[in-house]
Amino acid sequence: MRFITCTTIFSLLLATAYGRDIRRELNLENWKFEIGNSDSYAKTDYDDSDWEYIRVPGCWEDAGFPGYDGYAWYRTIVYIPEELKRKTLRLRLGRIDDVDRVYMNGVFIGGMGSMPPKYESAFNFQRDYYIPANFLKYDRENLIAIQVYDEHSCGGISGGDIGLYSENTVELVENLTGMWKFTTGNKPEYSEINFDDSDWQDMMVPAPWSSQGLGDYDGYAWYRKEITIDGSLKGERLILALGKIDDAEQVYFNGERIGGSVYGPLHQSVGRNNNFYNQESYYYIPSHLIRWGRSNTIAVQVWDAWNIGGIYEGPVGITTRKLYMEFKKIW
């Protein structure tokens, strides 16, 4: 018989999938467009006044660039109202032929496929990227820039419902969408509060690791994030939201395990009949573990058996028990 702690039971109860109210806020049909490639095209101060206009979705060959294969860029300015600040925003770009890298206000937020020289097409994947709230300017103009590489045939943003979408999620008091420290492999010291992860790579969260240079990697990997929790929240009970994780996870806060989708070694517990990957993960943070007003370490061990891998869909951040209960309508 397997024994599970109360914290684990509570964590498993929280790791439940809920419906989403997703709506399109902006229709992104019109873009500035230029063939060629330069890192400066992603910058907010770049002058694109002499670029052509192009409508998406559609192959760029059909928009006056017949037979062109190679690099090209799309740019557009969007105005994001303050009223969307409390919502999770997603950039849906449909299908892109073949490889893309997406920037919001000059900062990378996601991409699929691999650019040359290690080219790998992702033409058959739907692009759907969460936008870190701290990358946005509310009630002001924001720049979206997209680098695309096409190997052959149809090129560019070729199909789908393109737009900026809002998603009703649990309200976060600390939004942790963005870059986390990441490494493949598995060592127990990776969970420790004082472990030096300075040589780990940066990984966008939430987004599949398969779309960020790891291809079809299956196995163990770790995420780490340093956060400061304001002392004004000291009277609140806090919950860590980690979105959806493919396939299973164990979660540590300041070196202590606070829960996981399964109990015990992940690779022994994940089978093809499990659906942990499709559940949102929420973990109560015991108050005695929190270092108020100082640095705290979140460490997440992930096991991926197949498919995309990693913390791939939001919300990701810190919420309160009150906000969690309001959102889930559990009274």
Image (cartoon, rainbow, N blue to C red):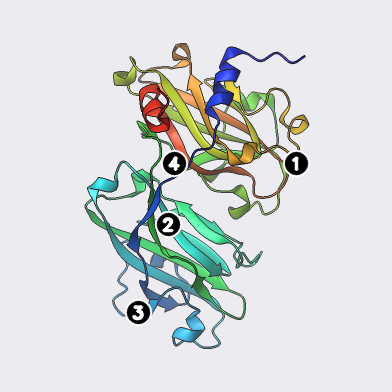
Mark 4 = which residue?
A: 177
Gap in angstroms between the C-alphas marked 2 and 3: 20 Å
State the image coordinates of residue 205 (x, y, percent, origin top left): 50, 43
Q: Amino acid at mark 3?
A: Tyr
Q: Amino acid at mark 4?
A: Thr
Splitting the image into 4 quarters, where does residue 237 fall?
top left
Classed neighbour count for the residue bearing mark 2: other residues with Cα under 10 Å, few (<14), some (14–19), many (≥20)? many
Question: Looking at the image, how many numbered discs can be counted on the residues?
Answer: 4
Q: Residue at the spot x=40%, y=39% of the render?
A: 169
Q: Residues within 10 Å of mark 4 (few under 14, many from 20)?
A: many
Q: Alpha-carbon distance for marks 3 and 4?
A: 32 Å
Residue designated by label 3: 53
In the rendered view of the protein, which quadrant contains the C terminus? top left
Could you say whether the residue bearing mark 1 is in a helix, strand or loop?
Answer: loop
Residue 252 visible somewhere in the drawing: no
Left of 301 or right of it: where is 34? Answer: left
Res 318 quadrant in image: top left
Could you say which disc has been placed on residue 91 in the image?
Answer: 2
Q: Which residue is mark 1?
A: 272
Find out whether the residues at labels 1 and 3 contact each other: C-beta distance under 8 Å. no
Q: Nearer the viewer, mark 1 or mark 4?
A: 1
Check contact, mark 3 vs mark 4: CB within 8 A.
no
Q: Secondary structure at mark 3?
A: strand
For marks 2 and 4, give the one nearer the viewer.
2
Residue lying farthest left? Answer: 139
Q: First in sequence, mark 3 or 4: give its number.
A: 3
Q: Amino acid at mark 1?
A: Arg
